[in-house]
Amino acid sequence: MSSFDQDYLFVCETARKAMIYQTSAETLEWDERTGMPPHGGDYRAQQVAALRGHAHQLRTGARYGEALERLSDQTAGSVLEATNVRELRRDYQRDQRLPQELVESASEMIVKGQQAWEKARHGNDYAGFAPVLKQIIALKQDIGGRLAEGTDQSPYEALMDEYEPGAKTSELAPVFENLKGRLATLIGELADGPTPVDVSLLKATTDTEAQKRFVSSVCQAVGFDFQRGRLDETSHPFCTTLGPSDCRILSRYEANWFPAGIYAGLHEAGHGMYEQGLDQMQFALPMGSYASLGVHESQSRLWENQVGRSRSFITWVLPQVQATFPNVFGTCDVETLYRCVNHVQPSLIRVEADEATYNLHIAIRFELEQQLIAGDVSVDDLPEAWNAQYQQTLGIMPDSDANGVLQDVHWSAGLIGYFPTYTLGNLIAAQLFDHARAEITGLDQDIERGEFSGLLGWLQTNVHSHGRRYSSLELVRQVTGKGLSSDHLLDQLEGKLKPIYGI
Amino acid sequence: MSSFDQDYLFVCETARKAMIYQTSAETLEWDERTGMPPHGGDYRAQQVAALRGHAHQLRTGARYGEALERLSDQTAGSVLEATNVRELRRDYQRDQRLPQELVESASEMIVKGQQAWEKARHGNDYAGFAPVLKQIIALKQDIGGRLAEGTDQSPYEALMDEYEPGAKTSELAPVFENLKGRLATLIGELADGPTPVDVSLLKATTDTEAQKRFVSSVCQAVGFDFQRGRLDETSHPFCTTLGPSDCRILSRYEANWFPAGIYAGLHEAGHGMYEQGLDQMQFALPMGSYASLGVHESQSRLWENQVGRSRSFITWVLPQVQATFPNVFGTCDVETLYRCVNHVQPSLIRVEADEATYNLHIAIRFELEQQLIAGDVSVDDLPEAWNAQYQQTLGIMPDSDANGVLQDVHWSAGLIGYFPTYTLGNLIAAQLFDHARAEITGLDQDIERGEFSGLLGWLQTNVHSHGRRYSSLELVRQVTGKGLSSDHLLDQLEGKLKPIYGI
């Protein structure tokens, strides 16, 4: 065996071993968010911290780092090996900047943070949550500072780099500004459009147990594999991977807001199908991992919006909706449901926001979290800053912290620098979908017939199979032949929404 | 800090750390048995093996062993410390006989074994399961041999010692023989009794969803704490502890056999209340752990049988049964239901067996598993040996392997030497309950009113609070003032069952 092969085997084995502990922690976190007994939280936090700490220890061992250094000086035999070495070394260089104790205390804090958030959101008690959030921000400032040291990144960029490798605020800020401008114009035009959309139909009461069965069958139809995954219920939908053939997606259901369950379900199924489309043999290695959170979000949004809110999809799904909820949707036609699910209205809750206003919610968080890490806004002042931003950007004022600053789990879970990946995902989804449509003959007709395997296969070939070979921006160029542009999303939105509103 | 205190702290910290990994593995196993996607099994086996292996590594470290040796040479300041040192040293001496690789391969084999068993039972395919069982038996023979080496135990006794410290086949065999004799006589008498019991009522169809809610409310009423635990559904009921405040119990429900769900529920709630009654501050240490599996089973059986099949309990529960299942039980009276749940009939399935025949099922397994480990019966010959034993002991012949040798999860899970603890538990339950009844004024009336806290408190004080301070036989003597005797169980059964059958 060559010295390259020896080192490569050792490195892969270590990465796989570390992943065992990471996925174990993720299983415990999934359980925590689906049904753990109320008093189980303190010990669960200790368990997750120990498991994540152990994974970190394996990923920062001296022998592992040395092997990666030697490997990176040699020429790999294949793209697969080269990508694995490059990306594992990247992770190593990042990980070894963080001492074991910091990783463990961050993990424990994050579990406690989510518990505190759950309670605070439920009781609309920001003051009760603030002390925990302060500790989280301080920890993330510490982590960001350590990661940024000696680089050209700011601490915030260093945090964001974990989710979106190579992303720079200097590149993102103008994209957000441009989006904000054109979106504000569009939203203003729609508000004055001659044919406003009435969504009272979506507020009629539907049985949530029936919703669950319906969403499950739609997720199965689009291609989420229930032999290798499952769908559960939670307060804040997410997708998590517990093993190469164990992907869990979670949705939530509201009796009086029909789109909540189905679009969260499609969204998470999109994430899940990306995970299920990755190379199983490369599980735990970069070539079997997602490229970035922006790319991940592009997969969820593509199924939720480009597919799920299209006229073709509504044409396919309507008979099932009618059959499952005859009292509410029995006499509904395609046009009515299509208009309803494309309703645009500035609102308080990001996860319920329409496609047009959604990115304004992200822009607010992107700005505020930069200020939190830079120390320009304090945790105590955050609700006020939040409310002011909502007033200014969306023209509405949160009626409570529960519907304002407390609505997202992210900051309580230590996910800072994560929000901008949502908007990146939206832009990538739009650009990929335009390209898929050009390459797949009859895609709209396929969707209308409930035939989704062509699109899923295209995504598997063009996106999933590459793992972490390309960064998000490289991937977009690789697939579509062009750099990332916000024109695809904006053109799609204008092209779809203006006719709906009679403009 | 004294050298004792230093060593003691280190030892406790190590035990707590090891328990983090053990309880993480148990969380993953709970998930595997409640809803893991079908294809998740291979990776799950790797995860559990790594976690259990890591716990074993911590529990067999040289520094840990040395500290325990030093501690055992000194005088502890309290019973609590002395018990923790004595029992942790006992565990250490046992654990360090097993090499890390053996523990890991056993863990992995056990997860795979359970998956193979699940499949084989479902498809009535013993031949498909046999190769896996052979590997498990070989592993357990290896483990038993290593544990027994240089002691006066046989390999089988060394395996049993894990579940029932200090138990000897030479002591148990006569108890089983005596029980078998008196029980066979009793069962024969009942079969010829002038007033046989008609259980067709229990076979009427009841909604399993309603059963679930009913069983949950009964578990809550007897004292299982849902803030620190939860109840789920599985194919083979069990109880597992995932943390000091996270105890999971699982039952199963049959639409056409009403007792299945409620008595499995009461049984597992009994286990769960024992776990919840242990000293939380001593979690992961012997003083916060159950004494033995025999004692554990005494707690489950006491709630299932001594409480759950008493006339007082039936008097209390009947109105709830009537309200929940009015079509089936609407006109049922106490006497009818009491007679039904105390029906005695030799049958094929252990977990559905009545109190009288139950211990005959155990006697068969006790005998067969000794022969398997000693090599006196082969895995290939096991179904035949099983069927012959059933014919001889219970007078009935299994109609299939699924209802015969494949009915229990235990051997597939590597639990060998475990079955005799069930009968020990039955004997201990009967003796403890006789004593509780003598000490708690009006216990029967309490049960009739649905007031269970007096009995639970008595068990907490007299059994739960002692942790592993006493062995099972010492505990019985400590609480009841007498050595363990099978008279309590036999007298209770005769006193209850003969009148029911008109003898």
Image (cartoon, coloured by chain):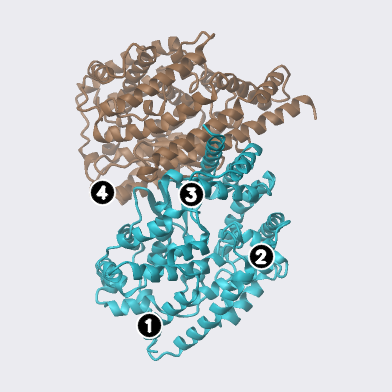
Chain colours: A cyan, B brown
To which residue does mark 1 refer?
A: A198
- The location of residue B247, given as percent across then percent down, is 50, 41
To which residue does mark 2 refer?
A: A127
Give me the residue at 66% from left, 74% from top. Answer: A384
Quadrant of residue B6 in the image?
A: top right
Q: Residues within 10 Å of mark 3 (few under 14, many from 20)?
A: few
Q: Chain of mark 2?
A: A
Are the residues flagged by discs 4 and 2 in contact, CB closer than 8 Å?
Answer: no
**Labels 2, 1: front one:** 1
Tag of residue A79 = 3
**Labels 4, 2: front one:** 2
Q: Earlier in the sequence, mark 3 or mark 2?
A: 3
Q: Earlier in the sequence, mark 2 or mark 1?
A: 2
- The location of residue A228, given as percent across then percent down, is 37, 48
To which residue does mark 4 refer?
A: B330
**Circles 4 and 1 on the same chain:** no
**Labels 3, 2: front one:** 3
| Quarter of the image that includes the C terminus of chain A | bottom left
Left-right relation of A12 to B78? left
Q: Residues within 10 Å of mark 4 (few under 14, many from 20)?
A: some
Dot 3: what SS?
Answer: helix
Dot 4: what SS?
Answer: loop
